[in-house]
Amino acid sequence: MLQQPRPHHWLYVGILASIWGFAFFLIAIALRSFPPITLVTLRLVIGAVVLFLLMRWQGLSLPREPLQWWYFSVLAIQGNLIPFSLISWAETQIPSSQAGLIMALMPISTMVLAHYFVPHEQLTSRRALGVVLGFGGVVVLMGSQALGGIGGVGLWAQLACVLATFAYAVNTVYAKRLPKMNGLVMGAGSLIAGSLIFIPVALIVDQPWTLQVSTESWLSIVALGALATGLATWLYFLLINDCGPNFLSIINYLIPVISFGAGVVLLSEPAQLSKFIGLIFVFFGIAISQPRRRSRVLNSPIEK
């Protein structure tokens, strides 16, 4: 069931963009003490605990059917284990700003996949133009420093980020095609499944009990787990359920917008004319990429 985005949906998008935009910085801090696999595992475990407690507080429970846990496992692998690991490793090789720029490719992958696999999310010239304009605006906002080194010594790390964007896109479309389920239950289940898969890997590969961990890295891990994994996963499934994959994917364009605004307002960074041009491109791209749906709800034969 796809809805016309409402004010609270845009609020959720803004919250997600803020959380995930800050996550690149938190990952860089956490990597000072934690290797990538342990970092991802702790994110999943903390996020799973947060969502499980919220789920129980609302009187909900996890399903017992094996098929549902198969769904959770696939969601965890596609949406958490693969992209989290790839991005965490990539940030040991390339700047976080460059990783963030590459993540802005996600709407392109999502747009193409949704065209074939999600009803009422067909690819149109209007939507394609909006996505291209949005990505162009992101490039202008992030500046030449993020483009520096593209295709250079960090090529494998850059390709890892590209693969991560594709994994996110596949997971977003897959989640929309699943049978209808409460978003909080789906979020908790997928994070629990991911934790169970990755805990043995982290114990064997990294032997985390031998690590010397700073207070900053612990605080970063807690924030990544509770906010960028737990809360963000819940909002992620709510938005997919209500508005579809293409609407959710615009988050990747809003992240640099929020970063730019925070820099100008909080850090007194110079607001160059080129940055405002980039903002115009981003907002115009988002506006024209959103289809003009009829006021009534569009019913899809496949609902989540």
Image: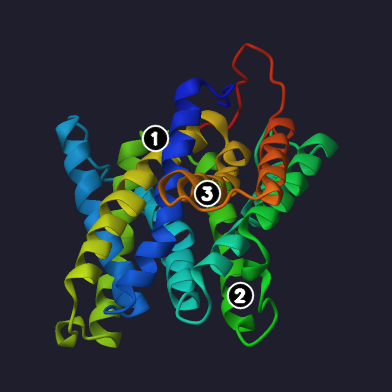
Question: Which numbered tag is attached to residue 181?
Answer: 1
Left or right: 246 in relation to 195 = right
Name the residue nearer the viewer: 202 or 127: 127
Q: Locate residue 88: give its quadrant.
A: bottom left
Question: Which numbered tag is attached to residue 261?
Answer: none
Name the residue nearer the viewer: 40 or 13: 13
What amino acid is at disc 1?
Answer: Met
Tell me which numbered mark, 2 or 1, is placed earlier along the sequence: 2
Question: Which numbered tag is attached to residue 255?
Answer: 3
Residue 51 position, x and y percent, is 25, 45
Left or right: 240 in relation to 266 = right
Q: Mark 1 and mark 3: span between their CA atoms?
A: 28 Å
Q: What element does badge 1 sit on?
A: loop
Q: What element does badge 2 sit on?
A: helix
Look at mark 2 in the image and give the residue it sits on.
Answer: 158
The residue at 69%/31% (across/down) is 287
2 vs 3, front mark: 3
Number of residues whose C-alpha sits closer than 10 Å to that of mark 1, classed few (under 14), some (14–19) or many (20 or more): some
* Above/below status of 218 relative to 274: below
Number of residues whose C-alpha sits closer than 10 Å to that of mark 3, classed few (under 14), some (14–19) or many (20 or more): many
Residue 123 position, x and y percent, is 77, 40
1 vs 3, front mark: 3
Name the residue nearer the viewer: 120 or 292: 292
Residue 82 position, x and y percent, is 47, 68
What amino acid is at disc 3?
Answer: Ile
